[in-house]
Amino acid sequence: MIDRTVTMEKDEKSSTLMKAVVRERYGSPEVLQIKELEKPAPDDVRGVLVKIYASSVNPADRYEMTGGPNLLLRIVVTLRSGLRRPKDPRLGNDFAGKVEAVNSNVTKFKPGDEVYGVCIGAYAEYASAKENRIALKPGNRSFEESAAVGIAGFTALQALRNHGHIQAGHKY
């Protein structure tokens, strides 16, 4: 009976932990580690818990890891993320996966929905995301294809709207 109780406690504990890529200081890829962290829970700010199936790498992730490629960007990144070392050790922004749980305030998504978008800590088994930073994954796209859209897709859309002045009905 004691063994059974110990096993149950371990199983309960392991279900609250997840693996994630983290860094405790800024630097080259050698600073990256895989660690077990507490699995996030949906809250009032990041109300959607997603089981991550795929994530992608982009320059923003590299800047978060290194602190930025030049002095000006390094200052901006470190002021936002932590001056001497990162406030939040998790990395990754773009992801695709399935909704596992939602906060009671979330209206657009439900558990089981396939989604993609941007969040903090996408290089992990789970991440919590803001409802307005994710979208339903198109059925004709894989998780891997969808994970590559986040920041790059938003940047392209910004360029088309803000600099290309594209509007509904325009054809080029």
Image (tube, helix red, strand yellow):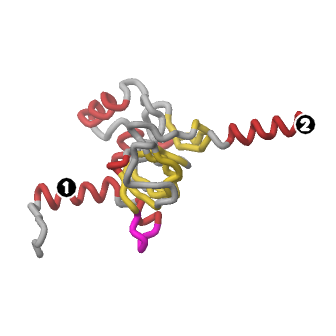
Q: Disc 1 on helix, strand or loop?
A: helix
Which one is earlier in the sequence, the residue at label 1 or at label 2? 2
26 vs 154, left or right, is right
Foreground: 21 or 125? 125
In the rendered image, residue 103, in percent from the top left (x then y), is placed at 45, 43
Quarter residue 70 falls in: top left
In the rendered image, residue 164, in percent from the top left (x then y), is placed at 11, 62
Q: Which residue is mark 1?
A: 158
> Does residue 8 sit above or below 167 in this rendering?
above
Q: Residue 141 got which mark?
A: none
Q: Residue furthest right?
A: 1
Choose mark 1 or mark 2, whichever is in front: 2
- Going by the numbered disc 1, the residue's amino acid type is Gln
In the rendered image, residue 13, in percent from the top left (x then y), is placed at 69, 37
Quarter residue 141 falls in: bottom left
Foreground: 77 or 109? 109
Does the magenta-highlighted stretch encompass residue 140?
yes
Question: The magenta stretch spans which residues?
Answer: 137-142
Quarter residue 161 falls in: bottom left
The N terminus is located in which quarter?
A: top right
Q: Residue furthest top?
A: 84
In the rendered image, residue 67, in percent from the top left (x then y), is placed at 36, 35
Q: Disc 2 on helix, strand or loop?
A: loop
Q: Which residue is mark 2?
A: 1
Q: Residue at x 47, y 64 (%)?
A: 143
> Does residue 20 sit above or below 160 in this rendering?
above
Q: Residue at x 51, y 39 (%)?
A: 41
Chief secondary structure of the magenta portion = loop
82 vs 100, left or right, is left
